Image: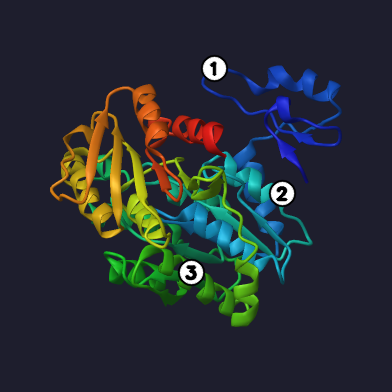
Amino acid sequence: MKVSIDTRTIEPGDTFIPVNGPRFNGRDFIPEAIRKGARVLDVDLVGYAKKYRKKLRCAVLAVTGSAGKTTTKDMLYAMLSTAFNVVKTEENQNNEVGVPLTILRADVDTDILILEMGMRGPGQIRTLAQIARPTHALITNVGLTHVELLGNQRAIARAKSEIFLSPLAWERKGRTAFLNVTSPHYDYMVKRATTAEFQVLPFGGHDKPEQNLNACFVVGRHFGLSDDQIRDGLTHYRASAHRMVQTELRGHGVLLDDAYNANPDGVTYSLQQLRRHAGRKILVLGDMLELGDHSVAEHQRIVGQAIDAGVELIFTYGTCTQGMVADDDTLWLGHFESKDQLIAQLLDEIKPGDVVLVKGSRGMKMEAVVDAVKAQFA
């Protein structure tokens, strides 16, 4: 069924579930939902989704990790949809509201339900897993996302491993975990998975794009797809908004819009994708937030990775990036305290054949740079 918690998106025949926010009561919008032709289901969203989940007979594949969750989810959807009826998390609906809403979109005809799970601290993945009760779990990697809140990578691995819950009496046997063998604390995650009675299937790769691709092959083979079917399915991959979306610039090369969010692993992934492109490479980087004491070192580490990727110019914005130093004559690095000044100089600098990558944490709103480049060249 199509469920909404926002009357602004209601269409006739939809189901409206009123939820409360910090500054609103969902029941206040029931009359508006009825006027728009919706059926009202006045229940607790999470509790209702838990009961609904027990009725589903489809495979439930939960995807989490420090970086690449959305990209991997979208790749899996493209691949698996060629042979199965698949429902997936849309855009960034990966929290305690989005996961229940996605579960309610599945029905008796659904073969595979793909749920992206995000987190900001300990206990949050466990909460989402208790709602979703995944039959399959994929952890893309363990990096430094939210290290300011969690303290170290071991704690991050522990928080991600909350996805492995011991089975309840009604759950089917034979659950499967897909784990990145190159990830820090891999052995710890294997132990957590096997203790919870998950069979572990590993994947790896020499860089993050290859690891995402290999994860898709391992998952696809597990669900019975041939390698040719997997390759064909991946040709239908479409990125979610601001997640490595490629736009051809009119006579001026390519824009890689990865502006939705940023952390060290995510920037590494983006640069490894950038390396695959021909042309002069430009990185536009906003602050990577929530890195705590790791911030200075992690921002500076990006400089070396950019050089390895063939980047010739770096435009930076924010307080965390202002300490970055280019220690190589092949790289120009300019810091801007004003986003408007950055945009003006970037637009003046872009030349035919350039490849421009835009990246930054959500709070930096780097999509403004993307919009400006598109307006000028796309």
Q: CA distance from mark 2 to mark 3?
A: 27 Å
Question: Residue 94 at what x, y percent from top left?
Answer: 53, 45
Quarter occupied by the C terminus: top right
- How dense is the environment of label 1, judged by Cα within 10 Å: few (below 14), some, or many (20 and up)? few
Q: Residue at x 53, y 52 (%)?
A: 116
Give SS at disc 3. helix
Query: In the picture provided, is 61 more to the left or to the right than 182?
Result: right
Question: Residue 84 at what x, y percent from top left?
Answer: 72, 68
Q: Residue at x 61, y 60 (%)?
A: 237
Disc 2: which residue = 105
Give SS at disc 2. helix
Give SS at disc 1. loop
- The amino acid pointed to by label 2 is Arg
Q: Nearer the viewer, residue 224 or 271?
A: 271
Q: Earlier in the sequence, mark 2 or mark 1?
A: 1
Query: In the picture provided, is 78 more to the left or to the right than 263?
Result: right
- The amino acid pointed to by label 1 is Arg
